[in-house]
């Protein structure tokens, strides 16, 4: 028992959250308000006529759903009447006059009414009529509109223009019942016995056996003067009266013999309305609440859903191009997630590639780029073989392998500097690791292109100096070393011994300590300040020294391995900003004409 309940709750949630109603108000009946009218549909058009307001009516109207318009047709052949009973068979409509036996056929092609064989039973009103195949059926009703309820049931054969009595309705005699047919079965339920107390029993008629069986009671409370019609394989009963006006609306599924509550009629609760279906749509109009009504409502047996055009067929829809439909139309999807419906490579599941386009529709262009680091700046001493060349490996993060590498120097390689072997070199310029041997400072840049076409770059400065010297007339290069403040030219194999006692490679810098030696902080008197410290790689150095002292001063950044990772000429400035890429402990060494200042520095990431 819980399953239908759950289903109906789910449906109600679906309706409420989707914002769509299954009911749509259509043009009011042009002929004006009324109740106890009769109606049917033929070939895509609906018909409502007769009924009463302050007086009984005979006018008849045709509704065209394609234009949502009503047009007046020939007055009902039987004259003014109310509580008439109607149905349609094929291309004709039929109406049994309320309270009389005269029975009329309407032909929309000729817009004429033709009186047919009188109804087989006694005169009545508020009966139920429907057709199955090419036969019409009328049963139940009231003889005198107050009581005198009936349960006889009759079949009309238009080909013979004759009436045949069939098995009495399975339930008690009643009037103001509702009915419809589905396939080759007819259904009658609800209605009132003598009086107005509503019933909810529901019965199925099988013309092949001329028999009635009771089916599940109508899903809502018992009632009378409801409307009934069918759409496809489902039947519907709604509105009506039972100590109050009703607007609830129920669907009957003969396959499961169950009732499912559908969305209430959006218009006013009412009874004695007219209901019929045209194609996949149901219609309810007119009636009384107790004010008389002329409004007219269309029921879609499905819930309208917004679908989004998927022109590029990538299964993601264009939020700007929508359609509302009961079922998913070809070329449309239920999501609105495509940010470019003209490109099937662009959608939320696409891989972001570096093309200047937001491929994955996350609002950001080319966000999947990676990065590359060539590490810290380096120092080279050309002519001193251990430090004449450097190999630098590009470290890539966040890109997509495989990568291609392109190293470039910001100037041409020097050659024939002083001697024929004074040549710079660069090898591995198209590989992850490049090796350069430089005579003079240059900037070396790496450009990495990943599998997605993303290119990212980094540059380092190679502080290089030519430390070759040529003692005597020899063309054999030796190495310049600063020894006790004097520049000397020594054999390569003697350099190590010189470095061991505090000399350094290259020309002398006044009062300069060995550049590559880590020293504890010294000369802490104000003069050299670094901030912030620790820092995230960007720092400011201020030198509160007089111009004379700062003249020709240099700053060395030395890592914990004693390597100079950066050297900066102060150029008479008192304040410098620079950056250190890699996290770690460093020493900033300021070498002036007079002394050396050293500060310890921490770079965090
Ligand atoms: Ca698309
Ligand atoms: Ca797309
Ligand atoms: Ca993106
Ligand atoms: Ca992109």
Image (tube, rainbow, N blue to C red):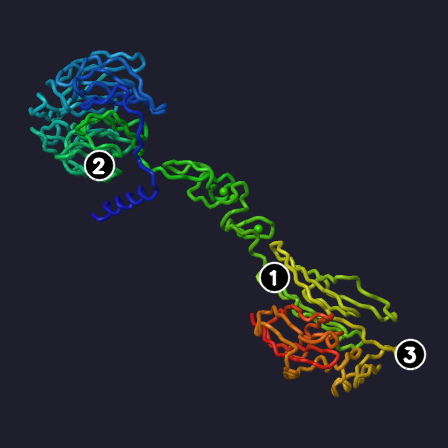
Say if 323 sits above or below 7 in the image: above
Secondary element under disc 2, as helix, strand or loop, is strand
Residue picked out by circle 2: 248
The x and y percentages for residue 417 are 85, 69
The residue under the point 55% across, 49% down is 358
- Location of residue 218 with respect to 600 vertically, above or below: above
- Residues at badges 3 and 2 in contact (C-beta under 8 Å)? no
Q: Residue 184: where, in percent of width, then height?
A: 24, 29
Residue 541 visible? The answer is yes
Mark 3 burial class by Cα count in 10 Å: few <14, some 14-19, many 20+ = few
Left or right, 285 with reference to 406: left
Q: Is mark 1 within 8 Å of ligand 4?
A: no
Based on the displayed image, in which of its 4 quarters is residue 435 positioned?
bottom right
Residue drawn at point x = 57 percent, y = 48 percent: 357
Disc nearer the start of the sequence (3/2): 2
Q: Residue furthest right?
A: 473
**Towards the viewer: 599 or 77:** 599
Question: Which comes before the other along the chain, label 2 or label 1?
Answer: 2
According to the picture, the residue beneath numbered tag 1 turns out to be: 371
Q: Secondary structure at mark 3?
A: loop
Q: CA distance from mark 2 to mark 1?
A: 65 Å
Residue 7 is left or right of residue 128, and the answer is right
Residue at 68%, 62% (x, y): give it: 446
Q: Which mark is residue 474?
A: 3
How would you rate the neighbour count of disc 1 (Cα within 10 Å): few for under 14, some for 14-19, many for 20 or more?
A: some
Q: CA distance from mark 3 to mark 1?
A: 48 Å
Q: Residue at x 21, y 39 (%)?
A: 257
271 or 187, which lies in front?
Answer: 271
Q: Pointers 3 and 1 in contact (CB under 8 A)?
A: no
**Label 1 SS:** strand
- Quadrant where the C terminus sits is bottom right
């Amino acid at each position: 028992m819980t399953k239908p309940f759950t289903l109906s709750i789910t449906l109600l949630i679906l309706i409420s959250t989707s914002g769509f109603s299954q009911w749509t108000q259509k043009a009011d009946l042009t002929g004006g308000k009324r109740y106890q009218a009769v109606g049917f549909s033929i070939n895509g058009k609906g018909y409502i006529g007769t009924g009463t307001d302050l007086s009984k009516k005979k006018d008849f109207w045709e509704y065209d759903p394609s234009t949502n318009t009503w047009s007046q047709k020939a007055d009902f052949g039987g004259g003014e009447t109310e509580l008439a009973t109607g149905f349609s068979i094929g291309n004709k409509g039929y109406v049994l006059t309320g309270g009389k036996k005269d029975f009329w056929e309407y032909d929309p092609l000729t817009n004429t009414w033709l009186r047919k064989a009188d109804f087989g039973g006694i005169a009545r009103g508020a009966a139920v009529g429907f057709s199955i195949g090419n036969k019409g059926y009328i049963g139940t009703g009231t003889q005198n509109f107050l009581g005198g309820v009936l349960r006889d049931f009759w079949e009309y054969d238009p080909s013979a223009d004759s009436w045949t009595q069939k098995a009495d309705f399975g339930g008690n005699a009643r009037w103001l019942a509702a009915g419809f047919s589905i396939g080759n079965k007819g259904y009658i339920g609800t209605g009132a016995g003598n009086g107005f107390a509503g019933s909810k029993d529901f019965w199925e008629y099988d013309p092949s056996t001329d028999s009635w069986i009771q089916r599940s009671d109508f899903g809502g409370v018992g009632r009378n003067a409801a409307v009934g019609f069918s759409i496809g394989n489902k039947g519907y009963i709604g509105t009506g009266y039972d100590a109050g006006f009703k607007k609830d609306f129920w669907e009957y599924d003969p396959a499961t013999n169950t009732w499912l509550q559908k969305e209430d009629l959006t218009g006013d609760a009412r009874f004695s309305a007219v209901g019929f279906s045209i194609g996949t749509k149901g219609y309810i109009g007119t009636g009384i609440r107790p004010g008389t009504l002329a409004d007219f409502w269309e029921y879609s047996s499905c819930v309208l859903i917004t679908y989004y055009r998927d022109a590029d067929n990538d299964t993601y829809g264009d939020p700007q191009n929508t359609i509302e439909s009961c079922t998913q139309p070809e070329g449309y999807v239920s999501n609105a997630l495509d940010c470019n419906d003209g490109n099937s490579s662009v959608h939320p599941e696409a891989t972001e590639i570096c093309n200047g386009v937001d491929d994955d529709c996350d609002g950001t262009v080319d966000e999947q780029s990676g990065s590359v680091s060539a590490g810290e700046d380096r120092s080279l001493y050309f002519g001193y073989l251990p430090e004449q060349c450097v190999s630098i490996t590009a470290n890539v993060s966040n890109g997509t392998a495989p990568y291609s590498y392109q190293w470039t120097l910001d100037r041409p390689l020097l050659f024939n500097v002083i001697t024929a072997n004074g040549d710079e070199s660069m090898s591995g310029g198209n590989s992850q690791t490049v090796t350069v041997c430089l005579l003079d400072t240059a900037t070396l840049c790496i450009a990495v292109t990943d599998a997605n076409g993303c290119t990212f770059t980094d540059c380092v400065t190679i502080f290089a100096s030519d430390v070759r010297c040529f003692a005597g007339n020899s063309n054999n290069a030796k190495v310049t070393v600063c020894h006790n403040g004097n520049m000397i030219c020594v054999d390569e194999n003697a350099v190590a011994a010189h470095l061991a006692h505090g000399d350094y490679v290259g020309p002398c810098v006044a009062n300069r300590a060995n550049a590559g030696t880590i020293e504890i902080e010294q000369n802490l008197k104000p003069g050299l300040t670094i901030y912030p410290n620790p820092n995230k790689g960007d720092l400011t150095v201020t030198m509160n020294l007089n111009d004379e002292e700062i003249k020709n001063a240099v700053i060395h950044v030395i890592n914990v391995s004693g390597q100079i990772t950066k050297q900066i000429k102060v150029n008479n400035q008192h304040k410098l900003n620079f950056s250190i890429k890699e996290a770690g402990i460093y020493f900033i060494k300021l070498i002036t004409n007079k002394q050396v200042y050293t500060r310890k520095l921490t770079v965090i990431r």
